[in-house]
Amino acid sequence: MNKPGFSILNYAAVIAILLVLIMTVLDVTLVNVALPVMASRFGITDSAAVWILTIYQLVITMLLLPVSSAGDLFSYRRCFLVGVVIFTLSSALCAASTTFTMIIISRALQGIGAACVMGVNIALTRLIYPREVLGRGLALNAMVIAIATAAGPTIAGAILSVASWHWLFIINIPFGIIAFIIGKRLLPANPPKAQTSRFDWTGAIQNALVFGLLFYAIGSFTRKGDATLITLLLASGSIIAVFYIRRQLHRSNPLLPVDLFRIPLYTLSICTSVCSFIAQNVAMIALPFLFLNSCGFSEITTGLLMTPWPLATMIVSPLAARFVERHNAGATAATGMAVYALGITLLLFAPTADISECQIAWRMAVCGIGFGMFQTPNNIVMVQATPVHRTGGAGGMQSTARLVGQTLGATTVTIVFALSSVMLTSVRSCLVIALLFAIIAGAFSLSRVKKM
């Protein structure tokens, strides 16, 4: 049964977006698995090899908001297509890389392309889907990300078992070409605006410096880098951030969407998103250590035990999207966080001795169900609370909130593990932290119910 006002051409346009979204997500998980192989190939240390992954994520974080602003001002479609071209060409450069320097430069270029796509992905989805079924489009995005995240390690292992690491990047090329052809023909143009503004190049540079310095400092901290350098980076990033925010407060179409933060519903949704991704990432990073070291499962079994979470999220997300078409999205998201908190509690108090795989799997599934019930309704509230002409900025901030939450979650795990030498104590402390942030996210979400 077709969605209201939704044709076969709309489906094709969605395919273009999802193809590139899959590639950009997979390029994190695929490369993560291949890091040991690439370190050996380039003759570098394992710590240096991490930069092949880090530079990609760092560039995305630095450019998300500038690209989103460019999409608002000029064209979401054009930003998307430019991103696809850059991502596809840089994938070819990654595959052709013969030195560590070349792969780092190529991955940075990939990050630029990925930022162009991620920064306008939500905005294009809003233009393609009718308002009454927008939630289904956002749920489809969430489902695709969950599938790519869950399947990434398996796909990487399968490719590396029959081919070299170069093929992890080569597979992007045909999909990039297909996405570009479809997108050029079918992606919609921006809605007309009453006035146009100039792109804020100064703000874009300040944004890149703020996020680049702060995230690099956080990464250095987790790798136990030089304390003096970390302090200087944090201080520099904070000082630039003050000037950056003050500049954005006086602009009509700010690059950092401070104008959108005047909308209470949007601000609550961003706070909810950051807390939820901290809660998710703290648990997702800590749990494998519990399964391996405390429960005594093998690496393969541990990987399988992590699967029910994204699998449940994938299944529940589209159901949650249909549900909120007739029910309050804020209440649904709050309920999802409550279910997620229940799943974390069940894992926290689960016995570590003689626990079976099934006993862990259903607890992980509860977490995934809760997050699936939360994520799509929260995204719907965030998008619909903003004007259509600012959807790019809203979508970019949504992606930025996710990255900030995930980074803070990873940093939290590092700190907790450093403070305790007993692995079981460290993991349980992380689960308590995840539970607390889930409760905070649920409280934020519940506070939105009367505002909708």
Image: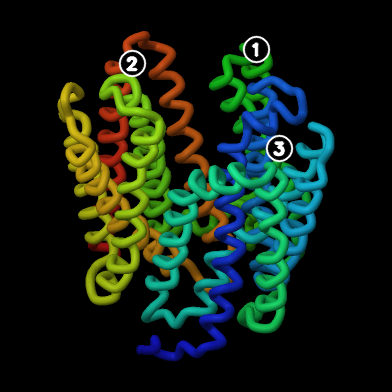
Secondary structure beneath dot 1 equals: loop
| Mark count | 3
- Identify residue for label 3: 209
Query: From the viewer's perspective, is residue 327 above or below residue 300?
Result: below
Q: Specify whether residue 401 is in view.
A: no
Residue 403 placement, left or right of 283:
right
Secondary structure beneath dot 2 equals: helix
* Residue 64 % position (x, y): 63, 52
Residue drawn where x is 60% and y is 72% of the image = 16
Residue 10 placement, left or right of 44:
left
Q: Specify whether residue 417 is in view.
A: yes
Q: Nearer the viewer, mark 3 or mark 1?
A: 1
The residues tagged by marks 3 and 1 sit, at their Cα atoms, a distance apart of 20 Å
* Residue 80 % position (x, y): 68, 66
Which residue ends up furthest to the front in the rendered image?
162
Residue drawn where x is 67% and y is 38% of the image = 243
2 or 1: tag closer to the N-terminus:
1
Query: From the viewer's perspective, is residue 199 above or below residue 48?
Result: below
The residues tagged by marks 2 and 1 sit, at their Cα atoms, a distance apart of 26 Å
- Identify residue for label 2: 423
Q: Quadrant of the C terminus?
A: bottom left
* Residue 253 % position (x, y): 64, 62
Identify which amino acid the numbered label 1 is placed on.
Asp
- Identify residue for label 1: 226
Question: For residue 99, which numbered disc appears in the image?
Answer: none
Identify which amino acid the numbered label 3 is placed on.
Leu
Secondary structure beneath dot 3 equals: helix
Tag 2: Cα neighbours inside 10 Å, few (<14), some, or many (≥20)? some
Tag 3: Cα neighbours inside 10 Å, few (<14), some, or many (≥20)? many
Q: Nearer the viewer, mark 2 or mark 1?
A: 2
Q: Nearer the viewer, mark 3 or mark 2?
A: 2
